[in-house]
Amino acid sequence: MHIDARHLPNNSIIEGDLCIIGAGAAGISMALDWNNSRYKVILLEGGGFDYDDSIQDLYSGKTSGQKYYPLRASRLHYFGGTTGHWAGMCAPFDPIDFKERPWVPHSGWPITLADLEPYYAKANEVLEVGPYNYSYRYWNEQVPNLKPFPLDDTVIWNKIWQFSTARYNTLYRDTIINSKNIHLYTYAQATNILTNDGLSEVSDIIVKNHEGKTHTVRAKQVILACGAIQNARLLLASNSQAPKGIGNQNDLVGRFFMEHLEVAIGELWLFEPFISDLYSWDYGKTRASAELAITEDLQEQEKILNGTVSLTPLKVAQYMKPRMETWQNEDPRKSMDNVFANWGEADEKGRNASGFIEKAHQLNIRIEQAPNPNSRITLDGKNDALGVPEAHLHWALTRLDKHSVRTIIHILGQEFGKSGLGRVKMKAFLRDPDDDLFPEETNGGWHHMGTTRMADDPHKGVVDSNCKVHGISNLFIAGSGCYPTSAAPNPTLTLTALSLRLSDHLKKKV
């Protein structure tokens, strides 16, 4: 069922069993899990079904620290959320990602990979990717020409990816609209969370829109699924009863913002061409491909973060600009056009390149960011059109981030040399071991994580192992904001699995 909140009488009261705030990957995945049940599910979306500049403005904000994309352009604000332009890269986290690692401050999840595996399988179905099998052996039997580099597998292994083309705006729109028990309210932007006098239970969600309408939502269980930045922003802005914000009694809401560092770290020059489709990717066509990863034992030995390295033919990569440069327009559509235009130009010029460069590849890393309490979301002094303070992202990196990237390129250089395959050339910004800074052109993956991290101890996290906000009996958070550490893979598969796990937990409560 679909209701446009702009057309409701002002000050309407909306009541249900479950209220999910945010209709992106996390929110829609959870709502679908309750479809055709006897429970009334309220799904709130601040925008409509299409792009709207005035709605997108609600994501505006400031950035500081390491250079970042404009906040307004880093997420899509309509039904389906950022699945509207995601790359579809899916891979589960590794066992090490959930462990407490002594060399990684603030690491360790209160759950394990085994706790998520049943939900990973279900998430694969929701995202319309292949089977929950990410082993090289399996995919080598399914897809031809997946020849791996002959490297020492005690040092380097092949991390397999599958690819989704799911766009929730079109894929699940009709299912949600036609549902008898899911009530989708568009143009219903959550602006405030109210609780009982003891701050122990959410009583009301205040929603507004640009038509000047204000409505109140009441539900037995409330789930924030607005993304890591907007979830933290809403909690902090809901400060009429709790001066520091809802769930922020220990000053943790907004802290530990994490991104994936994505940057070219070197070049691989092979002695002979290596004919394989294992390390290539063609959107919409590739079923599975791989990136080079460092084994868990070596990560512990070298005291580094988890990361994966992909290859781009140098004949193309030499013409590609950093996305941090081309994605700087406040309009996400124009930024995307800029990126695709540069990629198209690079591909065209690369096709005309020839010679020894056919054996050369650019090495690109995607690596988790070390959890850092100083990397955070706070509120800016400027309010948006609906009266909510805008977000301020301060993206802050640590010495461990740079050390890990530098160590990984060293490992790759050693292993390719030992194998007799070729040589690796390191990028200049990594050569000084005393330089901890990253260049401005370092990309983020548009992967917002942290800000409401998971921990059983309320002094270490905002939510518990079931994603419930500490101290509030009926407030939960879905999505990658709950991650204590960010791992190397893109977050959508894992945030979907984590949201489905939360959904199962809530079925025991309503």
Image: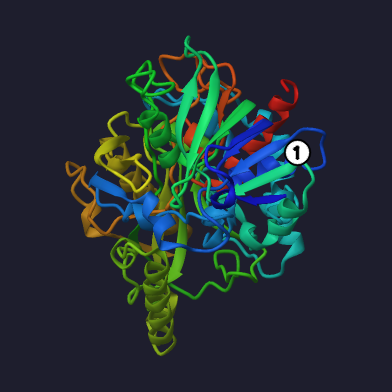
Q: Is residue 442 visible?
A: yes
The location of residue 420, given as percent across then percent down, is: 45, 62
Q: Which residue is mark 1?
A: 34
- Total labels: the figure holds 1
Q: Label 1: state its secondary structure.
A: loop
The location of residue 106, given as percent across then percent down, is: 39, 24
- Find the residue positioned furthest to the front: 9
Of residues 96 and 464, the one drawn nearer to the viewer in this rendering: 464
Quadrant of the image occupied by residue 449: top left
- Find the residue positioned furthest to the top: 198
Q: Is residue 73 left or right of residue 272?
A: left
User: Which residue is found at the position 61% from the left and 23% from the top?
Assistant: 466
Location of residue 33 with respect to 350 vertically, above or below: above
User: Which residue is found at the position 65% from the left and 60% from the top?
Assistant: 166
- Mark 1: give few (<14), some (14-19) or many (20+) Cα within 10 Å: some
The location of residue 43, given as percent across then percent down, is: 63, 42
Q: Is residue 262 visible?
A: no
Quadrant of the image occupied by residue 229: top left
User: Which residue is found at the position 72% from the left and 29% from the top?
Assistant: 504
Q: Is residue 493 left or right of residue 299?
A: right
Mark 1 is on which residue type?
Trp
Quadrant of the image occupied by residue 358: bottom left
Quadrant of the image containing the C terminus: top right
Q: Is residue 197 left or right of residue 478?
A: left
Q: Is residue 449 left or right of residue 16?
A: left
Location of residue 17 with respect to 460 vertically, above or below: below
Q: How is the image coloured?
A: rainbow
User: Which residue is found at the position 32% from the left and 68% from the top?
Assistant: 326
The location of residue 465, given as percent across then percent down, is: 58, 22
Of residues 485 and 12, the one drawn nearer to the viewer in this rendering: 12
Of residues 49 and 486, the one drawn nearer to the viewer in this rendering: 49
